[in-house]
Amino acid sequence: MIKIILIIVAVFIVYCLIEMIRELRDFRVTKYRICSQKLNGIKREKKIIFLSDLHNRMYGEENERLLESIRNQHPDLILIGGDMLVRKDGNSYDKTVHFLAKLPGICPVYCANGNHEQKLKELPDKYEQSYEEYKKALTASGIHMLENASETVKLDEVPVKLSGLEIPLGAYARFGKKELSLKEITDRIGEHGDDYQILLAHHPGYMKEYLAYGADLILGGHYHGCVVQLPGIGGVISTNFTLFPKYSGGIYQEGEQTAVVSRGLGTHSVPLRLWNWPELIVLELSGNEISFRMKFDKR
């Protein structure tokens, strides 16, 4: 009996190792459909690509596999949620910049920062890499930077407000959760307003606060899917050592509001993944009227 148990354990360990190797070598496309009455002026479904937590990862020469996958989706908009680079010395972001600079050739691109970019920006003397050079290269390619700022785009006749939020760096502490008040959010990006709003807010540990702010669609990342995803349960442990965080990766409906948390495209501190594939997220936006018509047509 003991021998059988040991064999089963050994087979399981081998399976986990093979699965981790597979998940570190490739990514998957994850699609979510999002409907809102505020989007009823959209004449046809719009596709938004959401990229987060690349951390300088390359999928093929010059990230061609990832770029090809993005092109194949024919997106109307690309949103970047931060941590595309690694802030630590010895990790050049040149290849990442080269990849990102190609995206505006596909469709409009809007970029918010994660904690890695924010630390480069706010602590310039601590790192050899320059945030200003990074930002300069991205804006020169046509990427719109959302640094505690908002811009409004039109999806057909519907105005959509895109906001990039940078929370205080202390909120990214590894142990314990710092307070983030509604005032701190509004001081940075202003009031929610009446238009449909997409909020790029990197740290999902403050989802309760983002929801209270009122954004219609909240896009986050940062946790990398908590390294291990247990089916039916979710992520095991977050980057700030919270066990089984609610918003570890996936889509979450909170009344009329929607939150999407990316499991990321790369790894950083813990270069492991298990049942937690890197993902390219495709958001399919439509109004409730369009969604109803599509459902009716299928029948």
Image (cartoon, rainbow, N blue to C red):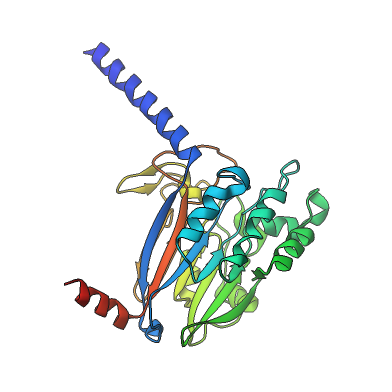
Residue situated in front as seen by the camera: 203 or 275:
275
Name the residue rendered at 46%, 45% in the picture.
237
Give the vertical position of 134 relative to 94 (above or below).
below
Residue 6: x %, y % from top left: 30, 16
Residue 12: x %, y % from top left: 33, 26
Residue situated in front as seen by the camera: 204 or 224:
224
Q: Answer whether residue 299 is visible to the viewer in this image.
A: yes
Q: Quadrant of the N terminus?
A: top left
- Determine the image quadrant of residue 117: bottom right
- Determine the image quadrant of residue 293: bottom left
Q: Quadrant of the C terminus?
A: bottom left
Name the residue rendered at 45%, 39% in the picture.
23
Please state the total of marks drawn on the protein image: 0
Name the residue rendered at 45%, 62% in the picture.
73
Residue 11: x %, y % from top left: 33, 22
Name the residue rendered at 76%, 64% in the picture.
136
Horizontal side, residue 79 vs residue 41: left or right: right
Horizontal side, residue 118 vs residue 171: left or right: right
Farthest residue toward the right?
125
Q: Answer whether residue 220 is visible to the viewer in this image.
A: no
Residue situated in front as seen by the camera: 184 or 265:
265
Give the vertical position of 122 relative to 18 (above or below).
below
- Determine the image quadrant of residue 43: bottom left
Residue 193: x %, y % from top left: 52, 86
Give the vertical position of 291 relative to 4 (above or below).
below
